[in-house]
Image (cartoon, rainbow, N blue to C red):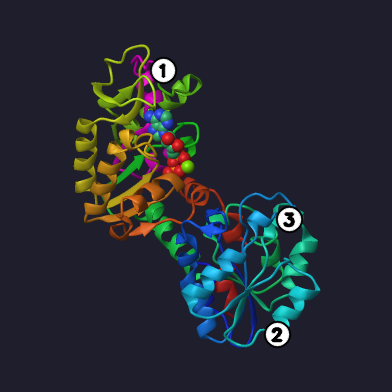
Amino acid sequence: MPKRSVTEANVSGKRVLCRCDFNVPIEHGRITDDTRIRAALPTIRWLLGRGARVVLCSHLGRPKGTERDDLRLAPVAERLSELLDQSVTSCRRVTGDDVRTAVDELRDGEALLLENLRFEKGEEDNDGELARRLAALADVYVNDAFGAAHRAHASTEGVAHLLPAYMGLLMEREVEVLGRLVESPERPFVAIVGGAKVSDKIAVLDRLIERVDALLVGGGMANTFLLARGREMGTSLVEAEHVDESRRITAKAEACGVEVFLPNDAIVSTSLERKGVAKAVDTLDPNEAIFDIGTETAKSFAGAIERAHTVFWNGPMGVAERPAFAGGTRAVAEAVAACDGFTVVGGGDSVAAVQQLGLADRIDHISTGGGASLEFIEGKELPGISVIPDVEASQP
Ligand code: ADP
Ligand code: MG
């Protein structure tokens, strides 16, 4: 059932509390990547353009209920002012008299930004009192923070019970695209899964296997699958305790008629500090570790990606933060970018890799939610979404 969208809300002249995900990297007061701020602009512009008085809010980092000067949202308000070409006031508090006054002074089409929600302990505790204080600042609630939708916090869940609640445009797009992936993907559907550990991704693998035509496994997690097949993994990152799980997943894939691709060759080294050498995965020395997929593997992955009509990618193919071990991730990113089908990338490190390579424009959807996008694909209920009323419920 579709959820109520901000496009159905009457916001003109109303105070709108808009929960965004402005959890951006900030170094020495400077924002080093403003992707998440830009992603929220369509909803903010929508609200401003319709004469709403916009009360923006977000968390930043993990201050755990204490005020920290390095985690203030002032730099975000500054960047928003530049991007929107109008002033966005930043508050030094989440709620309270000064905030109240600032909200009262907003005119139609103006915005302000509350202080970091996690300065309040009640945020992560989903405290009813904080939810009430937030709700008292507005007439309407819009949630556009897909990246925080898997958390039931005061600003993502509690407050939505207290005000007429709607999804923002970004949230709507995430739900639509990820929903399409799990419900009605155009075939062939190819999933590429990598990253460090298989244990992080078991639930998502389980669900993907029921949907995809081919599963391409790379990154550190492939090592555990290779170990399950009796390969000597040297000093590679492996999770011996998950060998049985990886066997079960392989067997399930076979039963579902899903083709599983594992690395045949790899870039190995005795240390991340040294350069890598290309090797077949069954010829590792005991002191060597796999740090990337090899060129043959990358080629065969790229071939499967090229034929796909739908692609979902999560998790780098190797230790992509090191240039010596980034080749496999680059090859896969290029193949996904070149694919004519519908392509989706989700996951903090995989998205960062795609962006660094300058390929983001050529991907159909870059999910702004790391954990949230995986939980969505796993089929879990996301509290920040389920709390929004269904479309039908809003119609008489
Ligand atoms: P995402 O954020 O895209 O979901 P993950 O967080 O699951 O991805 O995985 C990224 C991490 O996996 C990176 O820190 C990377 O160094 C690590 N990784 C990938 N391949 C390997 C490998 N072969 N050995 C050790 N670590 C790896
Ligand atoms: Mg990560």
Give the secondary structure at mark 2.
helix
Identify residue for label 1.
Answer: 235
Query: In the drawing, what numbered circle is on residue 377?
Result: none
Given residues 287 and 18, the one toward you in this image is: 287
Q: Which residues are magenta?
A: 205-234
Q: Earlier in the sequence, mark 3 or mark 1?
A: 3
Ligand 1 closer than 8 Å to label 1 CB: no
Q: Residue 322 location in percent, x, y?
A: 37, 36
Give the secondary structure at mark 1.
loop
Residue 373 visible in image: yes
In three-dimensional space, the C-alpha distance between marks 3 and 2, rounded to whole angstroms, equals: 25 Å
Q: Tag 3: residue type?
A: Glu
Nearer to us of marks 3 and 1 is: 3
Magenta includes 237? no
Q: Tag 1: residue type?
A: Thr
Establish if 17 lies above or below 60: below
Give the secondary structure at mark 3.
loop
In the figure, is residue 33 to the left or right of 335?
Answer: right
Residue 249 visible in image: no
- Badge 3: how crowded within 10 Å, few (<14), some, or many (20+)? some
Looking at the rendering, which quadrant does residue 278 occupy? top left
Q: Residue 164 location in percent, x, y?
A: 65, 74
Q: Tag 2: residue type?
A: Glu
- Badge 1: how crowded within 10 Å, few (<14), some, or many (20+)? some
Ligand 2 closer than 8 Å to label 3 CB: no
- Badge 2: how crowded within 10 Å, few (<14), some, or many (20+)? few
Query: In the drawing, what numbered circle is on residue 105?
Result: 2
Magenta includes 208? yes
